[in-house]
Amino acid sequence: MTTESDLPNAPRYSQEKSARFEYEVAFKSLELLADVRFKLLAIVPLITGAAITLLTTDKLQSRPLMVLAVSVFGFFVTLGLTSYNLRNTQYLYATRYRALQLEKQLELPEGGTIPR
């Protein structure tokens, strides 16, 4: 029975197979990271509209403490979303860089499937 280690091109085949798998994972990760970014872009305006509606009703204008509480909460939500988006961008750039390296290693055509 012949095993992979008995074949003369086994290390090359194994490395290429591993690189192809890593490339597929990187590509799926890029799609996921972009999807999360667009979901955030869709949710933030909805939350902002709800907060503006909540803060501009007549009942709440007579309660400055409630307006302050909602404003502070909104500030921290915005701060959290901004830091999350910055970290997401770092992951996106690192994953894109690795995927481009793998494209070169696998000798895929220039300008393959990874967005630049």
Image (spheres, rainbow, N blue to C red):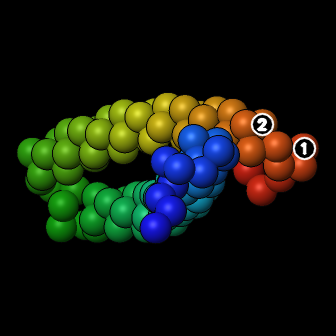
Quick check: 93 above or below 71? above
For mark 2, what is the residue? 104
Name the residue located 57 percent from the left edge and 41 percent from the top edge.
11
Percent position of residue 103, x then y: 74, 43
Judging depth in this view, the residue of 110 and 70 nearest the camera is: 110
Quick check: 15 above or below 53? above
Determine the image quadrant of residue 60.
bottom left
Name the residue located 53 percent from the left edge and 50 percent from the top edge.
6
Distance from disc 2 to disc 1, alpha carbons, whole Å, reads 8 Å
Percent position of residue 75, x then y: 29, 38
Q: Is residue 98 left or right of residue 36?
A: right
For mark 1, what is the residue? 110
Judging depth in this view, the residue of 38 and 43 nearest the camera is: 38
Where, quadrant-wise, is the C terminus in this rendering? top right
Circle 2 or circle 1, nearest the eye: 2
Determine the image quadrant of residue 97.
top right
Mark before the other along the chain sequence, 2 or 1: 2
Quick check: 34 above or below 94? below
Let me know if residue 7 appears in the view: yes
Judging depth in this view, the residue of 28 and 20 nearest the camera is: 20
The amino acid pointed to by label 1 is Glu
